[in-house]
Image (spheres, rainbow, N blue to C red):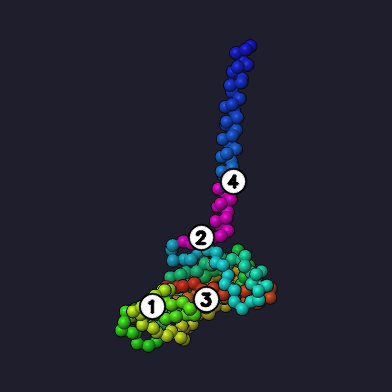
């Protein structure tokens, strides 16, 4: 009788440990699921030329402080081709207003093109507000991109006023609407262009502007 009681007592700690392991494994699984759900909600950035479903904070335009405060927690999931190609006047923009978004959006595409003769010096800069930018110009297309810099020593200043050309303006896209190709309005020579996709967001009920932000594009014309 005594031997049986002793054996029963020895089995209880093993059962307790097994139960504890199961509970710990279940807890870790729940934590993993929560992290995955958070990642899906916030979106991720992939490195395939598609800027896919990442969450951009809205940069509010001319809104009152109360309106701006109300919009602060909002995010807008963006999906578009950050390296579009133009062939026969058609650009594969592949833009989508995700069904997760609450805002209507409109996209304007501009290219940046230097209109004067390219300066002989290799180092040129411009300024926007209080920020200085190095200007890199593609020699074939005269398209340029800007890179923020702090020191302008040995740089030559250039003005870039009115050097941006709108090549496409979309209709307003409702959430869950997409656009694969768009027709550009400018006849561009073959080569590489630096551009911008300007997103303007609107409240679905009132139609009021809710925010504006830009995404840089590397555009190729074949």
Q: In the rendered image, which quarter is residue 178 located in? A: bottom right
Q: CA distance from mark 2 to mark 3?
A: 20 Å
Q: Which mark is residue 44?
A: 2
Q: Is residue 41 magenta?
A: yes
What secondary structure is the magenta-colored segment mainly? helix
> Mark 1: which secondary structure?
loop
Mark 4 neighbour class, 10 Å CA radius: few under 14, some 14 to 19, many 20 or more: few
Magenta-tinted stretch: 32-46
Query: Farthest residue toward the top?
Result: 1
Compared to residue 70, the image places residue 157 above or below, namely: below
Judging by the rendered image, the residue that carries numbered circle 4 is 30
Res. 118 image quadrant: bottom left
Residue 78 seen in render: yes
Q: Separation of disc 2 and disc 4 at Cα? A: 21 Å
Contact (Cβ within 8 Å) of mark 1 with mark 2? no
Does residue 189 appear left or right of residue 97 in this picture? left
Name the N-terminal-most of marks 2 and 3: 2
Nearest to viewer (mark 1 / mark 2)? 1
Real-space Cα separation, disc 1 to disc 4, in angstroms: 53 Å
N-terminal label among 3 and 1: 1
In the rendered structure, find residue 152 and report the number of the disc placed on it: 1
Query: Which numbered disc, 1 or 2, marks the residue that appears first in the sequence?
Result: 2
Q: Is residue 87 left or right of residue 201?
A: left
Q: CA distance from mark 3 to mark 4?
A: 40 Å
């Amino acid at each position: 009788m005594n031997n049986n009681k002793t054996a029963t007592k020895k089995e209880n700690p093993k059962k307790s440990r097994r139960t504890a392991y199961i509970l710990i494994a279940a807890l870790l699984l729940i934590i993993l699921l929560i992290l995955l759900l958070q990642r899906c909600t916030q979106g991720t950035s992939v490195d395939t030329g598609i800027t896919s479903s990442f969450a951009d904070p809205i940069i509010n335009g001319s809104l009152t402080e109360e309106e701006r405060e109300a919009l602060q927690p909002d995010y807008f999931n963006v999906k578009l081709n950050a390296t579009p190609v133009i062939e026969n006047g058609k650009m594969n923009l592949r833009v989508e207003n995700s069904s997760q978004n609450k805002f209507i959006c409109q996209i304007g595409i501009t290219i940046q093109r230097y209109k004067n003769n390219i300066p002989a010096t290799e180092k040129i800069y411009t300024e926007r507000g209080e920020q200085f930018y190095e200007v890199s110009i593609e020699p074939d297309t005269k398209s340029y991109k800007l890179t923020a810099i702090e020191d302008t020593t040995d740089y030559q200043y250039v003005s870039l006023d009115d050097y941006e050309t709108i090549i496409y303006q979309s209709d307003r896209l409702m959430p869950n609407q997409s656009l694969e190709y768009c027709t550009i309005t400018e006849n561009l020579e073959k080569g590489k262009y630096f551009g911008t996709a300007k997103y303007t967001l609107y409240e679905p009920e009132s139609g009021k502007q809710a925010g504006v932000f830009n995404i840089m594009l590397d555009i190729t014309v074949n």
